[in-house]
Image: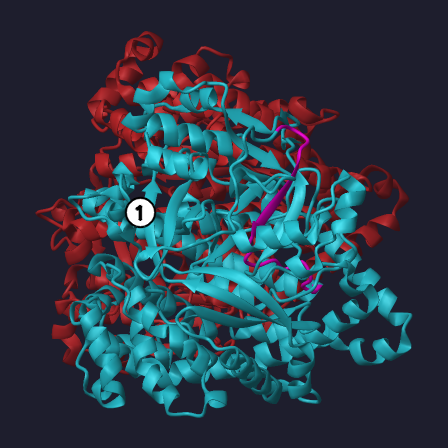
Chain colours: A red, B cyan
C-alpha cells in the first residue's frame, strides 16, 4: 500500500518550483547551478570544474538512495539504511549480518549485493525540442501516448545496454526535457556495514529528530569485469572536517518534492490521500511488530520491511502535519494567488492557462472517487512475488506489441535491464509474502466492500488469510530458475503455469489493466496536461532562476553547518559528540550499543563530532549523499533531516528545516578504532 | 488510546443544538418531546402515557449501550455486541460461549454478568436554579470547582445507594441542569446470546453498512433479592412487525453528539485529534490481529477488545470523513455565521457572547500543544489493571479530602457504587495487559520523545516491551481479593504494596495529576465557560424548540422505516430477508453461519424480514435500543447505523442517514426455530 502511494506521489512531482528561491533553498541541477548566487552569498564560486568533479564522483542507487565514490578503486560510501536490504538478503539465520555487521577483511571477501545497481550521471542532453515536437497539439490520452513513445525512442536510441542507462527527465513539468546518460554498475559488492544497533542507533523514536547519534554509514564497491572499477573521479576525505558556519554542499538524488502543486492538489493530499494512507501503514506496522516478536527468525526476515514502513509513516505523517498547519497552508494559497495575479497581467497567457486551476480541481474530485479502484484493482498487492508474477504475466503480451503501444515499463529500452531485476537472487519469505497478501485483501474488502465484483473475483468464498496462504503456498516464484523458465517460455509457459501466484496475476490482469487505463485517461492524462499549462506559464514568468521540483535525479544543494531552535524554544547546536552517543546508550534496543563499540570506548576521543545539522535543502532520496566542503572533500554523510524538514516536500522553511549527517570524523574514528578496518581507512584517508 | 479519546470527545458534547430541527431530526428528552410536531407530520400524537410507558420500559447499560424490558419478569432485550463483554468473561477455553452461544434452558441456569449494571430512568428533576445559583459570577477553576461540588452534593442528597443512582445532567451546555433519578439493577444474568458468527455476521467489513444480515440480539434478566425483578412496565412484542413507511420510535441513550461545536472546535477534531488518533488505533489493531492468529486462546481472550477497536476506528474514520467533506463543513461554517448574525442583532447578548468564538479558537490552539501531555501523562495506559491500580492508589488520598475538593470520580456519591466496579470478578489476561501497556509506552516515547522526563520516569533503561512485561508479571491485581485487601487497607496498604502495577501507578501519580490539572485549568475550565456563553445565547435565540446534544441519557427519536440511495446511486430497500442471510453465507469468517442456523434453514420462512433501516436520528450508545411502533410495541432492535450515519455526530442529514435494526420477526424466528428457546419465546410473545 505504502510503496504504491509513494510512487503515486511521484507522479505529481514533476513540477518546477514557485518563485525565485530564498536563502539556501533549492535542489539544483548540475547544468543550471546558481554559482553566482552562491558566490554573492558566501564569497566562493563553484567553478565548472568543481561541479563536474562532484557530479562525476556522485552516484544514484537505483532502489532510492544516493552515494559517492570515495576512492579510485570504486569504493562507494552510502548509508547503512541504504545497504540494509542487501545486508538482509546476504544474511541467514547462521550468519546474521544485520545484527553482527559485515566487514570484508580482504577484497575477495566483498560479497555481491543481489539486484543492486549504481548509476553515475555522465552527461545531460537537451531534448526539449524533440519531445515537444512529438507532442505538439495533442491532449489527453493521445498526449500521454505520444510522450511515452518519444521518451522510449530517445532512450533506446541513446544506446541503453547493461552498462548504459538513458532516461528522459521532464523538468519544470514539461518546460524542459533532458536526456540523462548514466553509466550503470550492476556488480556491486558489500565491503562494510556496521551492526544494526549502531547503524540505526535510536531507531524509530530518534528518526527525523536532532540531536542525533547514529553511525548510519556503509561501504560497497563497484566492480567491472570481476575487478574493482577504475574510478579516477572520486571525493577525497577532508583532513579536518567542518565547523559551524562552514559552507557545505550536498550532492544527491532527492526523490520527490511537491512544491508546486496547486491548492486543490494539496487539498487532495491533505484530505484524501494522507488520511486514507496513514492508518493502513499503521495497521500493517502493528501486524509486523507482533510478527517480529514471535521468533528471532521472523524478526530477521522483516527488519528492513518494518524499518521502511516506520520511516515512511513518519515522513508522511510529517507531511500531513505541514499541510494541516493553517499558517503553512496559507503560504501555499498566497503563492497560488500571486502566480495567478502575475499571469492575469499577461493576457495571452491568461487565456490559455486561466481555466487550468478549475480543471485541476475537478480532476482532484475525480481522483477521490477513483482512489480505492486505483489503489486496489490497478495496484494489486505490494508483495515481491506478486510484482514478479505480474511482470512475467504481462511481459509476453506487451512484447508482442509495437514499442510505442506498450505499457511504458515494458518499452524496448527497459527490457534491456529487466533481467537484472527479474532474476536477482533475492530471498523471499513465504511468511512475509502471506502477511502482505492477506493485508491487501483484507483492506480491499473493507474499502471496496464485500459485494464488489473484484473482491469476489479475488477471494471467492475464502477469508483473506486462507486465500493468501493458498496463493503463497502454491507458488515457487521465490526460485530464480522458475522465473527464468517462465521468462524463456513466454506466453505459452505463462498460460500453462499452475503456479498459484502466476494464476492470481493472470486472473486479475484484465480488471487491473482496465482500472489503470481508466485512471490514466481520467486523471493522469488530463492532470499532466493542466499541470503542464500552469508550469509553462510559471516558466514564462520566472524562467530558469528557479529550480525544478525533485525527480530522483542528480541535484546539488548548498548551505551551512548550523543548528536551530526547536519547538520548545531550545537552541540545538549543530554538532553532537561520541560522548553523547555513549551517554544515550541505555543498553536497551534501540539504544543499545554493540559489543564492538562498548569495547572501543576508551580508544575514541569522546569530543569527536558524531552527527551534524546543516541548512541544505534535501529530501528522501538524498540518503547516502556526501556532504562536501569548498575543496570538494567529504565532511559528512547525509542520512536524515530533522522533524522540520518533513514539510520540505511542499516548501523550504529556512529557520528550522535541517539536513542531518554523520560527521566524516566519526565515520573514520569508527572504522579505525571500533572496526579496525585498516584496509578501508587507508583507502579513503591514506 | 481510543477509549480515552472517545471520552475526551464526550467532554465536548454537552451542547444544545443549532436551530429548529429538520424532518425526523432529534434525540429528544422524554420531558420535552415534540409530540405536536410528530402529530402534525404523522397524524399520531404520542401521549404522556405513551411516553411514560416507553421511558419506564427502557434501560441504560452502564458500559455504553441501551436496552429494554420485554417481560414483566425482568427479561431484557439488547444487542449481542452489548453483552459480548459478559459472554467473553463467562467463557473459558473449555466453555467458549462466544463461539458456541449461550442459552439458559431453565431460569437457574441464567448466569450473572460480572460488573454489569442496568439503569432505569424513573424521574427527571429540574435543578437549574440550584446549580446556577452556586456558580453565578464564577469563572475558570472556581467555576469548575463550584459546579463539581454542587453536582456531587445534589447527587448525594438524592439518596444514592446500591439501588438508586442520581446524576446531574447538563443539557444545552449549562442552559438547563436536571437531576436524573435511576433505579439500578446490579444483579444481571445472561439468558441468551447467539454464536458470535451470526451475532456479528459480516463482522467488520459489514459494520456500518446496509444492506445487512445480522442477528445482533441477546437477552439478559434483571434480578432483585435473588429473584427475577418484577417489572410491570415492559414492551410488548408486535404481532405483525413493521412495513415500509411506518412511523417508528427509538428509545435509548445516544452517547455523544457534537452538533454544536464551533468551527474552531471542529477544526481541532479534523486537524489534530482524528489524524493523531486513527493511526494509533490502527497500529494496535494490527498488533491484536496478529496476536489473535497465534492461538485460539489468544483469539478468545481478545475478541471483544478487537471488536471494539475496529468499531471505534470505523466510527471515527467516518466522522473524520464528514469533517473532511468540504460541502458538509461549509454547512457548519454557515450555521455559525448565521447564529452570530442573530446574536449581533441583540446588542446585550452580543456584548457578552461576541468574543467567545475567538476565545475558544485560542483554547483550541492550546489544546493542540497539550495534546500529547494530556493523552499520555494525564491519561496513562488503557489497561484494565492499570485503571484499577490508579483507582486504588488515589482512593485513600481523595477520601481524606472534603467531598467538594476531591477529583469528581471520588465524590461521596460515586464511592457508593465504586466497589461494584472494583471487585467485579472480571478475567484479566496478562498477555493482553502487556500488549496494551507496551503499546502505550512505545507511542508515548515516540510522541513525547526519548528525552522527555516522564518517558524516562516510566521506562528508565528498559524497552517498552520489557517494561510492560515486568509491570504485568509482578502484579496480582487480577485477583479481586487482592484488590479488596488494598481497598480495605487504605493508604498504609497502598504505600507498602510491592505489586508492580500499584508501584507504577504510584510512581506516575504526581505527574499525572499535574498534567490533568493543567489541562483542566487551561482547557476544560475556560472552554466550558465560553461554550456555555455561546450555548446560553443560542438558548436565548431558539429556546426549547431544539433538542440538547446527546449526553448518554434517555432520549426518544422518531422516524419512518425507509431505504435510501447509496453512494453509487443505487436504491437500497429498507428490508433484508433471511433468504439474503443464507445467500451471503460463504462459510468463511465473517460470513460463516453456525451449525444451528444451517440446520434450521428449512424451518424458517426465507421471506422473513432480517434487518431494516429507518430514518431515526441515533448514534453510538443507542445500540440495544428497542424500535417501537405507534402501539408502543417492539418491531425491532437497533444495532447500527449505515455509513452515512457516521457524520451524524456533527449533523443530521435526512436523505441518507439511516438507523439499522434487527427485525423483531427475525429475532422471534431465530429464538423459535434455530434455538428452540421456548422458555423465552413464550415469555416475550405469549
- Nearest the viewer among A154 and B401 is B401
Q: Is residue A276 above or below residue B456?
A: above
Tell me where residue A502 sits by quadrant.
Answer: top left
Tell me where residue A394 sits by quadrant.
Answer: top left
Residue A434: % across, % down: 28, 34
Q: Report the residue at 31% width, 65% height from top.
A: B384
Residue B547: % across, % down: 70, 59
Residue A266: % across, % down: 64, 50
Q: Is residue B395 above or below residue B422?
A: below
| In magenta stretch: residue B292 | no
Q: Residue B263: tell me if it is visible.
A: yes
* Chain to which mark 1 belongs: B
Badge 1 density bin: few <14, some 14–19, many ≥20, Cα 10 Å = some
Q: Is residue B429 above or below residue A403?
A: below
- Nearest the viewer among B655 and B292 is B655
Q: In which quadrant will I find the N terminus of chain A?
A: top left
Q: Is residue A121 above or below residue B585?
A: below
Q: Report the residue at 61% width, 27% height from top.
A: B572
- Nearest the viewer among B402 and A261 is B402
Q: Which residue is mark 1?
A: B303
Residue B24: % across, % down: 71, 45
Q: Report the residue at 22% width, 20% height from top.
A: A482
- Label 1 secondary element: helix
Q: Main secondary structure of the magenta part?
A: loop
Residue stretch in magenta: B243-262
Tell me where residue A441 sits by quadrant.
Answer: top left
Q: Report the residue at 48% width, 44% height from top.
A: A6
Instruction: Tell me if A10 is positioned left or right of B280 in this view.
Output: right
| In magenta stretch: residue B257 | yes
Instruction: Tell me if A247 is positioned left or right of B297 in this view.
Output: right
Amino acid at each position: 500500500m505504502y510503496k504504491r502511494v509513494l510512487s503515486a506521489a511521484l507522479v505529481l512531482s514533476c513540477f518546477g518550483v514557485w518563485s525565485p528561491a530564498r536563502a539556501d533553498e533549492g535542489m539544483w541541477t548540475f547544468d543550471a547551478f546558481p554559482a553566482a548566487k552562491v558566490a554573492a552569498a558566501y564569497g566562493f564560486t563553484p567553478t565548472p570544474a568543481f561541479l563536474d568533479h562532484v557530479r562525476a564522483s556522485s552516484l544514484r542507487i537505483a532502489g532510492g538512495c544516493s552515494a559517492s565514490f570515495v576512492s579510485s578503486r570504486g569504493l562507494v560510501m552510502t548509508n547503512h539504511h541504504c545497504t540494509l536490504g542487501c545486508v538482509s538478503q546476504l544474511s541467514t539465520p547462521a550468519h546474521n549480518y544485520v545484527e553482527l555487521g559485515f566487514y570484508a577483511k580482504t577484497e575477495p571477501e566483498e560479497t555481491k549485493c543481489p539486484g543492486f545497481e549504481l548509476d553515475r550521471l555522465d552527461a545531460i542532453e537537451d531534448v526539449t525540442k524533440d519531445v515537444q515536437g512529438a507532442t505538439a497539439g495533442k491532449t489527453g490520452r493521445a498526449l500521454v501516448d505520444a510522450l511515452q513513445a518519444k521518451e522510449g525512442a530517445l532512450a533506446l536510441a541513446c544506446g541503453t545496454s547493461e552498462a548504459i542507462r538513458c532516461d528522459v527527465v521532464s523538468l519544470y513539468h514539461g518546460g524542459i526535457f533532458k536526456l540523462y546518460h548514466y553509466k550503470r554498475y550492476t556488480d556491486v559488492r558489500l565491503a562494510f556495514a556496521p551492526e544494526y544497533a549502531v547503524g540505526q542507533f535510536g531507531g524509530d523514536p530518534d528518526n527525523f529528530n536532532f540531536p542525533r547519534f547514529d553511525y548510519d554509514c556503509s561501504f560497497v564497491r563497484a566492480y567491472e569485469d570481476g575487478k574493482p572499477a577504475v574510478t579516477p573521479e572520486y571525493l577525497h576525505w577532508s583532513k579536518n572536517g567542518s565547523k559551524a558556519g562552514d559552507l557545505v554542499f550536498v550532492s544527491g538524488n532527492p526523490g520527490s518534492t511537491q512544491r508546486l502543486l496547486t491548492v486543490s492538489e494539496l487539498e487532495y493530499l491533505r484530505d484524501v490521500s494522507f488520511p486514507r494512507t496513514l492508518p493502513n501503514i499503521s495497521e500493517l506496522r502493528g501486524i509486523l511488530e507482533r510478527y517480529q516478536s514471535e521468533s528471532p527468525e521472523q524478526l530477521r526476515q522483516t527488519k528492513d520491511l518494518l524499518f521502511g514502513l516506520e520511516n515512511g509513516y513518519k515522513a508522511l505523517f510529517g507531511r500531513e502535519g505541514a499541510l494541516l498547519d493553517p499558517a503553512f497552508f496559507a503560504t501555499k494559497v498566497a503563492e497560488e494567488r500571486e502566480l495567478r495575479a502575475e499571469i492575469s497581467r499577461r493576457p495571452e497567457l491568461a487565456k490559455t492557462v486561466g481555466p487550468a486551476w478549475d480543471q485541476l480541481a475537478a480532476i482532484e474530485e475525480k481522483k477521490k472517487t477513483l482512489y480505492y479502484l486505483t489503489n486496489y484493482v490497478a495496484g494489486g498487492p505490494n508483495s515481491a512475488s506478486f510484482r514478479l508474477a505480474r511482470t512475467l504475466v504481462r511481459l509476453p503480451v506487451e512484447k508482442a506489441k509495437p514499442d510505442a503501444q506498450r505499457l511504458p515499463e515494458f518499452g524496448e529500452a527497459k527490457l534491456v535491464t529487466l533481467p537484472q531485476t527479474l532474476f536477482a537472487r533475492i530471498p523471499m519469505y513465504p511468511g512475509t509474502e502471506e502477511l502482505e497478501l492477506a493485508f491487501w485483501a483484507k483492506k480491499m474488502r473493507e474499502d471496496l466492500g464485500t459485494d464488489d465484483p473484484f473482491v469476489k473475483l479475488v477471494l471467492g468464498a475464502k477469508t483473506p488469510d486462507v486465500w493468501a496462504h493458498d496463493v503463497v503456498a502454491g507458488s515457487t516464484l521465490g526460485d530464480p530458475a522458475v522465473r527464468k523458465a517462465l521468462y524463456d517460455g513466454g506466453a505459452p509457459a505463462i498460460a500453462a503455469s499452475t503456479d498459484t501466484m502466476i494464476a492470481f496475476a493472470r486472473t486479475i490482469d484484465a480488471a487491473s489493466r482496465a482500472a489503470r487505463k481508466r485512471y490514466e485517461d481520467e486523471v493522469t492524462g488530463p492532470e499532466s496536461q493542466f499541470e503542464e499549462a500552469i508550469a509553462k506559464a510559471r516558466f514564462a514568468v520566472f524562467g530558469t532562476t528557479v529550480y525544478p521540483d525533485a525527480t530522483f535525479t542528480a541535484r546539488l544543494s548548498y548551505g551551512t553547518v548550523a543548528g536551530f531552535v526547536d519547538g520548545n524554544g531550545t537552541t540545538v547546536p549543530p554538532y553532537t559528540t561520541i560522548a553523547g552517543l555513549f551517554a544515550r546508550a541505555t543498553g536497551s534496543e534501540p539504544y543499545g550499543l554493540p559489543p564492538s563499540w562498548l569495547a572501543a570506548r576508551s580508544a575514541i576521543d569522546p569530543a569527536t563530532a558524531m552527527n551534524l545539522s546543516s541548512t541544505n535543502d534535501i529530501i528522501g532520496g538524498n540518503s547516502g549523499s556526501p556532504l562536501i566542503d569548498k575543496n570538494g572533500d567529504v565532511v559528512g554523510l547525509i542520512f536524515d533531516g530533522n522533524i522540520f524538514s518533513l514539510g520540505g516536500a511542499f516548501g523550504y522553511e529556512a529557520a528550522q528545516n535541517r539536513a542531518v549527517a554523520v560527521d566524516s570524523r566519526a565515520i573514520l574514528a569508527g572504522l579505525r578504532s571500533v572496526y579496525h578496518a585498516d584496509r578501508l581507512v587507508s583507502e579513503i584517508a591514506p
